[in-house]
Amino acid sequence: MMETALAHFCQIIRDHTGLIVPEQDLPYLQEKLTRRLRVTRIGEEDRYLALLTDESAASEAEWRTLVLELTTGESYFFRDAGQIRLLREVIFPELLRARAAERALRVWSAGCSTGEEPYSLAMIVQSLLPGAGPWTVSIKGTDINEYALQRAQEGRYGRWAFRGVAEEVVEQHFYRSQGEWQLNPAAREMVTYERLNLIKDPFPDPDRGLSDMDLIVCRNVFIYFSHEAIAGIMARFAASLRPGGYLLTGHAEVQQPVAQLVASGAVPLVARPFPDSVIFQRPPSGDPPLLTQPQRVEAPFSPAFSPVHGRVPISPSAGRGVGVRKAPAGAVLSGQSAEKRLKEARDLFEQGRYGESIRMAEGLLGISSVSGEVSLVLARSHANLGEVAKAEGYCREALRQRPFAAEPHFLLANLVHDRGDLEQTKDLLKKTLYLDHAHVPAYLQLATLYQEEGILDRARQMRLGALDVLHGLPPTSRVEHYEEWTVKELVGQLEKMLGGAAGASVRRG
């Protein structure tokens, strides 16, 4: 593909989706476009460009398919403990008081991916309204990726989507169904989904329910958008809010020069800093004008947060208070009995009965034949209950007992990631792969981290590594932490991200 043609494609993609294709990612974009030329049987670049720039139904259909190649996302319930705490303890209580007369609340999750975010918002609201009488709560989830929206509408998730979620929360809102967790109707019925392109589609739009919002949540969406696109979207978000309504974005996603526009009032929002995050608010009175064009602002603006601000801090000694409680005196177990009880503790964990799993495992502490595995079970159970300090303490104990085991390194990587230590997260994921070259989740999580940092060649290498491992597994099997997909489905998703030619080259290798 000629360099000029590729540049033209980049501009069209940016105009249509807001996505910026970095220079180092151009070879991968070329692979994706070459694949679409082959699949559509168009063959010629000029004709494919004409299709994408046409206003026909065929053009819209091709964009819907191409977007699946260009976008991806991973989410999980109650992501970012600091922002969730801000919503639960400050923002939603404030909004519910303000809307008490109407007894109605309108929320928008923009860039909702597979539904974990809007459903988390629904569960928070439910927890704040027990016995409060009838309320009309409307939560709208939108995304440009239709495959993600289909998954969201199903409301079915694997265990990995609940990392860090307390056992009682999962049991309250989900039930087991065919090896997955199905969301209960009460929360599910509060949320509706719709495809929306934040760049091309108009909003506010009362006909689509995208106006008079009390809260808009748009996290991990702007990271690949241009400053101009972010400024325009934020201005339209402001116009879509009620007076006094809030807009929550991801940490450090709104930076200069967009932050300068907010600080100057050119984007009609005000920033309210909290210990856990900054949230933007439409002024309580007056109708903010739409931003028609960016304005130059000379005054510097320093956001009151950093990419890791708002994480739950854990002191260096946090994990050391866990201790190791040995089995009671006289309770000497044979190796066979200890293994049997360890299996029972693991089974309880797999059933989501984390408290019972902890009680069973604690009775095995101090028994050397199973001590490393026991510490890992305890770390996993405490992590899924949201008890991060205890989880990290047991995880480090598991590493002390089994320094060459991959899984404690992987679990600890996720724990330190949740408190914002990205460098240690990467180091632990690399150690996981050093100890287990076939650890697919470690490949995929490293790929996500590199992608967020803009190191796209490394992200691609990690995904190719995962794909190589997956091609050696039975297609109908499932990978731990990604149980919602079969191996075949995971392969399909990765090949879409990498381009069909890349997937084929891995198979031939």
Image (cartoon, rainbow, N blue to C red):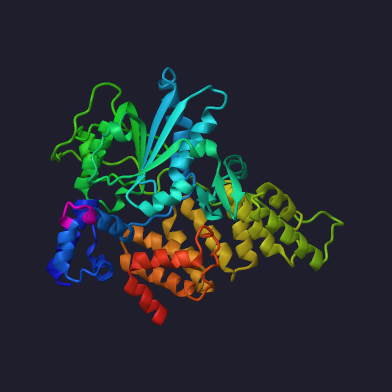
The quadrant holding residue 168 is top right
Residue for point 44% across, 44% down: 117
In the image, residue 183 lies in the stretch drawn in magenta: no
Residue for point 48% across, 41% down: 120
Instruction: Provide residue 365's location: percent of width, then percent of height.
Output: 73, 58
Please identify the residue farthest to the front as the structure is shown: 57
Q: Nearer the viewer, residue 72 or 418?
A: 72
**Is 270 drawn above or below residue 494 in the view shown?**
above
Q: Nearer the viewer, residue 330 or 205?
A: 205
Residue interval drawn in magenta? 53-59
Instruction: Provide residue 268's location: percent of width, then percent of height.
Output: 23, 32
Q: Nearer the viewer, residue 345 or 56?
A: 56
Does 484 sit left or right of 237 as displayed?
right
Instruction: Provide residue 397's location: percent of width, then percent of height.
Output: 63, 60
> Where the N terminus falls, by quadrant?
bottom left
Residue 407 seen by the camera: yes
Residue for point 42% across, 17% down: 101
> Where the C terminus falls, by quadrant?
bottom left
Does 331 sit left or right of 304 as displayed?
right
Please identify the residue farthest to the bottom as the structure is shown: 509
**Is 110 drawn above or below residue 244 in the view shown?**
below
Instruction: Provide residue 273's location: percent of width, then percent of height.
Output: 36, 34
